[in-house]
Image (tube, rainbow, N blue to C red):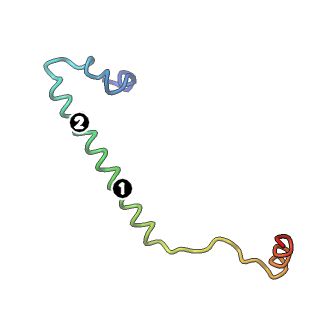
């Protein structure tokens, strides 16, 4: 099978596989989908650990006194 044959989605794959090989194909397909899910879940968990351990820094520049006074006068 090439990529063009898979464009019909997972539902149409059953019709494209020989009946004597269908059981093995479905087991293999199920295993592949399961492993893909486990892999993406593991990568997401590892990335969230990295985010939790990252140092937090403020990106806003502190306002100067003149800017703070202008902002306060406008809001009053």
**Mark 1 crowdedness (10 Å alpha carbons): few <14, some 14-19, many ≥20:** few
Residue 35 x/y as whole percent: 26, 45
User: Which residue is label 1 attached to?
Assistant: 43
Is residue 30 rendered to the left or right of residue 44? left
How far is the residue under mark 2 from the one under mark 1?
Answer: 20 Å
Residue 20 higher or lower than 39, as above or below: above
In terms of secondary structure, where does tag 2 sit? helix
Query: Considering only order in the chain, which callout, 1 or 2, is on the residue closer to the N terminus?
Result: 2
Residue 23 image-quadrant placement: top left
Residue 34 x/y as whole percent: 26, 43
Quarter occupied by the C terminus: bottom right
Residue 7 higher or lower than 35, as above or below: above
Is residue 31 rendered to the left or right of residue 42? left
The answer to whether the residue labelled 2 contacts the one labelled 1, judged by CB atoms less than 8 Å apart, is no
In terms of secondary structure, where does tag 1 sit? helix
The front one of 71 and 54 is: 71
Residue 63 image-quadrant placement: bottom right
The front one of 4 and 75 is: 75
Is residue 73 rendered to the left or right of residue 60? right
Residue 5 x/y as whole percent: 36, 21
User: Which residue is label 2 attached to?
Assistant: 30
Residue 25 image-quadrant placement: top left
Residue 58 higher or lower than 25, as above or below: below
Residue 74 x/y as whole percent: 85, 70
- Give me the residue at 32% from left, 21% from top: 12
The front one of 64 and 31 is: 64
**Mark 2 crowdedness (10 Å alpha carbons): few <14, some 14-19, many ≥20:** few
- Give me the residue at 31% from left, 24% from top: 11
């Amino acid at each position: 099978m090439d990529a063009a044959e898979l464009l019909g989605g997972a539902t149409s794959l059953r019709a494209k596989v020989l009946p004597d090989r269908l059981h093995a194909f479905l087991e293999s397909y199920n295993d592949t989908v399961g492993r893909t899910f486990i892999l993406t879940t593991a990568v997401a968990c590892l990335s969230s650990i990295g985010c939790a351990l990252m140092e937090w820094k403020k990106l806003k520049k502190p306002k100067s006194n003149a800017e703070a006074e202008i902002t306060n006068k406008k809001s009053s």
